[in-house]
Amino acid sequence: MRQLIRFKMNAVFLVISFCIASVMYNYSAGVEGSINAEETDKLLYKFTYGATVSVGAATEAGYNRKQAKQDMLACIEGITEEQNTLIFISVFCVYVNYAHTSCMAEIYLSGPMPKYSFVKGGFPTEEMLSSGMRYVVLGDGMRHNTYRKSGKDYILIQGDEYEVTGYVSAPNSGILSDTILLFYDAIGSNVIDSLCEYYISESFVLQYMSDTNQAVYTLMMDYLHTLVLNSKSEFEYVLESDVYKFITSDGARKHDYSSNAEQVLRYQRFARLIYIFCIIVIMFVLWLWMVQRQEEFTIRKTFGYSVFKLWGMVLVEITELILVSAILSELVIAVIAFVDKDMYVFKIEDAYSRFLMEVCFIYISLIIVGIVSFINLCTKKPVTLMNKGKK
């Protein structure tokens, strides 16, 4: 450690470079871990069987907006409840709060509730849904959009006030962070109007999900055939009449969860470039540090120190610097994770994975500095250095 104090500027540069390299290494490795964690969580909320239908108005029907809205409501309200089948309207865009922040929402229609993990509260009860009030379940990441009133949380959706009955969060990732789950029996007219815009201009997606009912596609098609008695379409998966146009598929549509990993994946290459740049800086500073100590190494060699003994001494000193850097980098990561709760690439709760990442970083760093220092010690001969000093 005394040698490090003697060359404190080099030691400081090495610590800073190792610290930045460690943060970038952990970020890059954390992206891969975050992707795997999201896939693990998606399996928790996945249903075994599914069927999907895109619901839209026929071209002729779309011209009469009032009639089109009535047709849409008739289509939704005609769905019969199946005890073992979740039926819901998939993601469509709504805005929240006065800033009109655009978010994606879903509407529960019937059947068992989604397999969400609650961190607070729960789903609204049947009594609540039949009370005429408006209720919503939110992802934990939506808390900042809510406000407190009379001891309860509320949020504005499409200009209407909704009471928040619970917050959901996945155990390993942030795929549920932006969840907005509405309930058809407890939504405002503004959401209905927004859904109608989808119905007329494009379409909205209706999904059937079940773990036990293998015939969900048949169930869905039986209902659609009551709405479209004689289809004008030549395609088997398209049912079209003067009122509706349905595009069906057997199997559950891939659920559109929010993804922190996809957002940070594009920065992974940038993080790797910074990591490589830091390693280059470390190699340069280390080489300079050893050049400044050539006379010391020459004297030690003259008094019988072997190259391997000198190399071991240097590695011990560098290891001390790397350990200090690893501790500092973990402090930096902890601060980032505290400030930004959605930075799941820096999730510090998983102590075992974090420890393995730091061990890998230290191992890789020691290999690199070990090669550089060994080459430097082998190429500098004591006789050459002593003669050089006499000139």
Image (cartoon, rainbow, N blue to C red):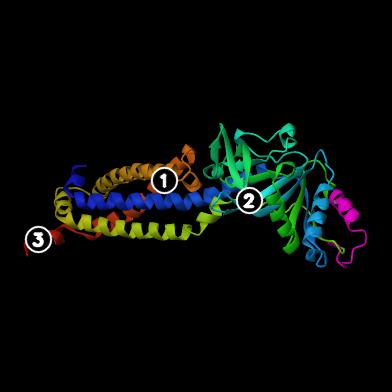
Q: Earlier in the sequence, mark 2 or mark 1?
A: 2
Residue 354 visible in the snapshot: yes
Residue 256 image offset from top left, x and y in percent: 65, 53
Q: Residue at x 25, y 45 (%)?
A: 313
Above or below for 315 versus 234? above
Above or below for 101 versus 355? below
Q: Amino acid at mark 1?
A: Ile
Q: Are marks 2 and 1 in contact (CB under 8 Å)?
A: no
Residue 176 visible in the snapshot: no
Gap in Å between the C-alphas at discs 2 and 1?
A: 33 Å
Q: Earlier in the sequence, mark 3 or mark 1?
A: 1
Label 1, on which residue?
336
Q: Does the stretch in magenta take in 153?
A: no
Of residues 246 and 377, the one drawn nearer to the viewer in this rendering: 246
Label 3, on which residue?
389
Residue 148 image offset from top left, x and y in percent: 54, 37
